[in-house]
Amino acid sequence: MTSPRRTRPAAGPRHLHPGAWWLWALGLAAAASRTTNPLLLLLIIAVAGYVVAARRSDAPWSRSYGTFLRLGLLVLGIRLLFAVLLGSPVPGTHVVLTLPELPLPAWAQGVRVGGKVTVEGLLFALYDGLKLATLLICVGAANALASPARLLRALPGALYEAGVAVVVAMTFAPNLVADVQRLRAARRLRGRSDRGVKALLSVGLPVLEGALERSVALAAAMDTRGFGRTADVPPRVARTTAALTLAGLLGVCAAAYGLLGSAGTGWALPVLVIGLAAAGAGLLLGSRRAARTRYRPDPWAWREWAVAGSGVLVAVLVIRLAALHPAAFAPSFVPLTAPSLPLAAALAVLVGLVPAVAAPIPPRSAS
């Protein structure tokens, strides 16, 4: 019996491999983590938003990007509120207002409630909150572009134990957004208001319950269809697989922490390579345990390479430029200076627009 030949991906509308979208989004997030320049952060948000607008499908989970945008604005507002109420570690001379300061005991030295609010402290909180909001928006872009179910189907066989937990976690937020929109539309059709605290309380519990039930139902359906079915392997192979996978993932986590920080650029890259090699070997050995087939597997063609490579290239270029010119990526607060847009870094971020052209147009639903 001859094995079937591997066919090329069909031309025309098709779904891009979800792993490529996540690599692209994580590349933008890694670039955003190396700067507090608001101009660069806003440029990253604009790039992510343009790609989402150009290449998202009409599936319910693709509408979650707006929710992540609002969540980013909420995080930014909370960060500014904390800076006003609890002060800022950045000393400043330009006082905006003075709040009544609450006296604290001696053991709480270094912490204050109220007091002077300076322009320098507010700008520090604004840039720091914008950085965190940009990271959330990049994750939201990946959620809006990559199907959670297709991403779970592309997981290696060695990670089948985490499959049920992953499908519940990955589909809960998109289902939550879809249920909110459905219930708000139902309230409007009945002539009721869909805004305000009363409307939020009336739809809150049904939304949470419905999103969780749909996520668990999807996980149960995958389990019924044989997802996670295992084959017998020697105990020595199982122990070696677990050791390699665990050591590799720990190495990748440590390297990611070093790359996102400012002091680990020297040792993080070798640790990342070693961790990826160990994790890859563990996943390759662990795939022998998974006795399952793939129905219409997502292809990994040149479009996937272009999308994933653009995100990785953005991260590499921005990290390199941040190491060469740190002042352009971290505007000064004392003395107070206006941020400037570094041209080389802006061009590097614009490489993230490649998916708007290289990624295939997603197919529309029949309805």
Image (cartoon, rainbow, N blue to C red):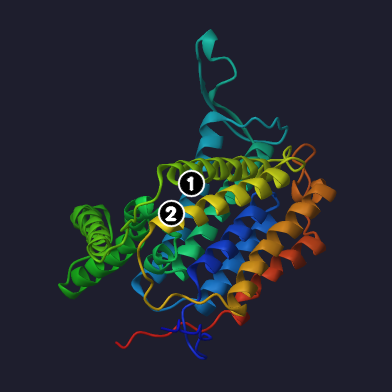
Tally of numbered tags: 2
N-terminal of the pair, mark 1 or mark 2, is 2
Which label belongs to residue 158? 2
Along the horizontal axis of the image, is 344 left or right of 245?
A: right
As rendered, which of 65 and 331 lies closer to the eye? 65
Pick out the residue farthest to the front.
1
Does dot 1 land on a helix, a strand or a loop?
helix
Which amino acid lies under the numbered mark 1 shown in the image of this protein? Thr
Which label belongs to residue 286? none
Pick out the residue farthest to the right.
324
**Residue 80 appears at what percent x and percent y?**
54, 42
Pick out the residue farthest to the top.
106
> Residue at image x 37%, y 55%?
160
Is there CB contact under 8 Å for labels 1 and 2? yes
Q: Is residue 309 above or below residue 81?
A: below
Q: Is residue 71 above or below residue 305?
A: above
Image quarter where the C terminus lies is: bottom left
Does dot 2 land on a helix, a strand or a loop?
helix
Along the horizontal axis of the image, is 295 left or right of 96?
A: left
Nearer mark to the viewer, of 1 and 2: 1
**Residue 56 appears at what percent x and percent y?**
47, 76
* Mark 1 vs mark 2, CA separation in Å: 8 Å
Residue 299 in sight: yes
Which label belongs to residue 241? 1
